[in-house]
Image: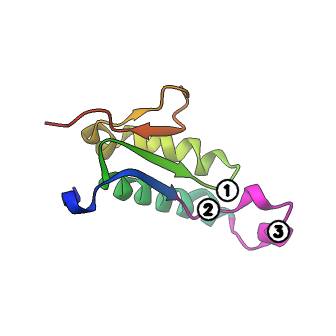
Amino acid sequence: SASDNYMFDVVLVDAPCSSSGVLRRRPSQRWLMSKEETLQYLPDLQLDIIQKAASFVKNNGTLVYATCSLLEEENEEVIRSFEKSQVYIDGGFVPWPFSAEGDGFSRPHEIT
């Protein structure tokens, strides 16, 4: 866990991604990413980043995960993996109430 000097009310994870959500503006992007990179490497990296970022969220703070990807592997599947992780469980994170799908997390109470 991060030192109290490095704890924040809100932590935004703007994760590196395949950029599938911007293909209309950047069609050449589709040829720059391999299937392996898009479906395995990036989700693993994204999960690693969100798990590390979680340690910087204060109690009662908010962790936000964002990508410009439309792929389930980079969004819902990363979040499902995070929700199953010990970091999520030990951190006391809960999905925001407006989304049963887990679009965001908050840390509503102090963990003892």
Secondary structure, mark 3, is loop
Looking at this view, name the residue that lies furthest to the left: 112
Instruction: Inspect the image, locate mark 3, and give the three-letter code of the amino acid beneath it.
Output: Arg
Secondary structure, mark 2, is loop
Which residue in the protein does label 1 denote?
A: 68
Contact, mark 2 vs mark 1 (Cβ under 8 Å): yes
Counting the numbered discs, the total is 3
Contact, mark 3 vs mark 1 (Cβ under 8 Å): no
Residue at coordinates 37% horizontally, 57% vertically from top-left?
53
Q: Earlier in the sequence, mark 3 or mark 2?
A: 2
Please provide percent x and percent y for residue 3: 19, 60
Residue 33: mark: none
Q: Residues within 10 Å of mark 2 (few under 14, many from 20)?
A: many
| Quarter occupied by residue 23 | bottom right
Q: Nearer the viewer, residue 48 or 60?
A: 60
Residue 17: mark: 2
Please provide percent x and percent y for residue 1: 21, 55
The span picked out in magenta is 14-34
Please provide percent x and percent y for residue 66: 57, 52
| Quarter occupied by residue 32 | bottom right
| Quarter occupied by residue 88 | top left
Which residue in the protein does label 3 denote?
A: 26
